[in-house]
Image (cartoon, grey):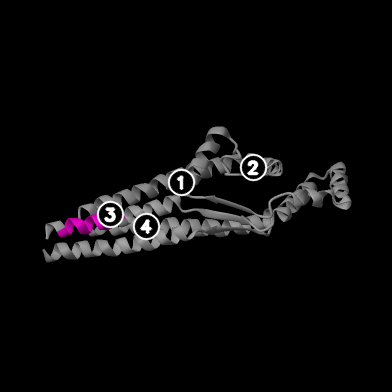
């Protein structure tokens, strides 16, 4: 019976570890349905905010002459960026260290000259927005670091408690799993709404299926914690 008990505990611990791994590595996806639409929208917003007649005339010339459409047609049709809890942690670390982001940080491809030019525009826009909101962004990055390590700590605590056959292991496990999924779901909704309003309506932020699997696996592991206690009681 003791052998079966330890096998069951190891199974539960394994499920908790799988949930942790999926939570940290499964991506949050940002998709832009039209690169040309994003660039046009961004240019128009910059021109409107700049209040510069020469810039406005230059952009109008590009649009009227068809040069803008020719340039935009050479860009990728859409954009898809992916990151995760682990990726965001590295991203925030790099930002706090360098006060800016690079194409490597954003996983931007530079396979063609057109992509290189477009990526430079994206980086300038992103870093300018970060610079304008530097204090709040740095504070958010520091808070994220705390949440990230708290999340890992809760999962490790749950694994340790499950290994010793403690029913209470399900508490930190469910807090970590449900909390991490809920935070990302809420953040994705807020990010999508904000990007629609301030950048372009064709941008959507969504969670991958791996994060749902992480939550389901954690719930199964929590049920396993209950059976650990039942087995101990019978013994």
The label number, if any, that marks residue 86 in the structure image: 1
Task: Pinpoint residue 98: horizontal percent, then vertical percent.
Answer: 56, 33
Which is more toward the observer, 212 or 157? 212
Task: Pinpoint residue 18: horizontal percent, then vertical percent.
Answer: 35, 54
Q: How many marks?
A: 4
Q: Look at 18% across and 65% down and name the residue there.
A: 230
Report the Cα–Cα distance between label 1 and label 2. Answer: 25 Å
- Give the crowd class for mark 2: few <14, some 14-19, many >=20 residues within 10 Å: few
Q: Which residues are magenta?
A: 4-14
Decide which of tag 4 and tag 2 comes sooner along the chain: 2
Decide which of tag 1 and tag 3 comes sooner along the chain: 3
Residue 13 inside the magenta-drawn segment: yes
Q: Secondary structure at mark 4?
A: helix
Decide which of tag 4 and tag 3 comes sooner along the chain: 3
Residue 166, visible in the rendered structure: no
Which is more toward the observer, 10 or 113? 113
The label number, if any, that marks residue 111 in the structure image: 2
Decide which of tag 2 and tag 3 comes sooner along the chain: 3
Residue linked to disc 4? 175
> Quadrant where the C terminus lies?
bottom left
Residue 189 inside the magenta-drawn segment: no
Check whether the beta carbons of the residues at disc 4 and disc 2 lie within 8 A of each other.
Answer: no
- Give the crowd class for mark 4: few <14, some 14-19, many >=20 residues within 10 Å: some
- Residue that protrudes farthest toward the top in the picture: 98
Would you say 81 lies left or right of 145 here?
A: right
When asked about the image quadrant of residue 50, the answer is top right
Residue linked to disc 3? 13
Would you say 112 lies left or right of 2 here?
A: right
């Amino acid at each position: 019976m003791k052998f079966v008990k330890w096998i069951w505990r190891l199974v539960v611990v394994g499920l908790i570890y799988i949930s942790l791994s999926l939570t940290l590595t499964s991506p949050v996806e940002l998709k832009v349905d039209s690169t040309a639409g994003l660039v046009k929208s961004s240019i128009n917003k910059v021109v409107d905010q700049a209040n510069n007649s020469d810039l406005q005339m230059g952009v109008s010339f590009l649009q009227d002459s068809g040069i803008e459409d020719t340039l935009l047609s050479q860009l990728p049709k859409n954009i898809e960026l992916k990151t995760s809890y682990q990726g965001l942690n590295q991203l925030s670390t790099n930002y706090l260290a360098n006060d800016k982001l690079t194409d490597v940080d954003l996983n931007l491809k530079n396979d063609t000259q057109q992509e290189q030019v477009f990526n430079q525009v994206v980086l300038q826009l992103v870093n300018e927005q970060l610079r304008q909101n530097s204090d709040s962004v740095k504070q958010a990055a520091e808070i994220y670091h705390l949440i990230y390590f708290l999340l890992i700590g809760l999962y490790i605590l749950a694994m340790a408690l499950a290994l010793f056959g403690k029913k209470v292991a399900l508490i930190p496990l469910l807090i970590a799993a449900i909390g991490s999924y809920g935070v990302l779901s809420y953040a994705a909704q807020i990010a999508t709404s904000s990007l629609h309003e301030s950048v372009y309506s064709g941008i959507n932020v969504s969670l991958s299926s791996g994060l749902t699997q992480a939550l389901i696996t954690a719930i199964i592991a929590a049920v396993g914690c209950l059976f650990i206690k039942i087995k101990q009681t019978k013994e």
